[in-house]
Image: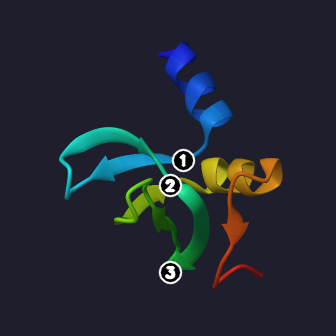
Amino acid sequence: MTTKKKTEEAEGITAYSVKTKTKNVPMIDPVIDIKSGRYIATGKDSEGNKMAAILGKVKAEEHVKSGVATKGSGWE
């Protein structure tokens, strides 16, 4: 389980693609918004399909700090 976390951090944010029904699809150019206290990453997959993933505060801040994602609305 530790290996998966390290791989996910190195690759970026992944999510489930409802359209293609595949897991762990890498998100391209993710933007993390804060809505109602939740951290929501939105972006697109390699085919241009919209994707979203809910993250915890720590993970969201790590992705922004490492440059994988950018801050959207709701950040102070």
Numbered label tally: 3
Compared to residue 11, the image places residue 37 above or below, namely below
Query: Hey, what amino acid is under mark 2?
Result: Leu
At which x and y percent is residue 75?
Answer: 71, 79
Pick the front one: 58 or 50: 50
At which x and y percent is residue 29?
Answer: 61, 62
Q: Report which residue position mark 3 lands on.
A: 35
Looking at the rendered structure, the secondary structure element under dot 3 is strand
Compared to residue 24, the image places residue 32 above or below, namely below
- Distance, label 1 to label 3, CA atoms, is 18 Å
- Identify the residue at image location x=58%, y=75%: 33
Q: Is residue 59 left or right of residue 47?
A: right
Query: Hey, what amino acid is under mark 1?
Result: Ile
Q: Quadrant of the C terminus?
A: bottom right
Query: Hey, what amino acid is under mark 3?
Result: Lys
Pick the front one: 37 or 49: 49
Looking at the rendered structure, the secondary structure element under dot 1 is loop
Mark drawn on residue 55 = 2
Compared to residue 50, the image places residue 66 above or below, namely above
Residue count near mark 1 (Cα–Cα under 10 Å), binned few <14, some 14–19, many ≥20: many
- Identify the residue at image location x=50%, y=21%: 4
At which x and y percent is residue 21?
Answer: 18, 47
Foreground disc of the pair 2, 1: 1
Mark drawn on residue 53 = none
When asked about the image quadrant of residue 57, the answer is: bottom right
Compared to residue 35, the image places residue 56 above or below, namely above
- Evaluate if marks 2 and 1 touch, with contact meaning CB atoms under 8 Å apart: yes
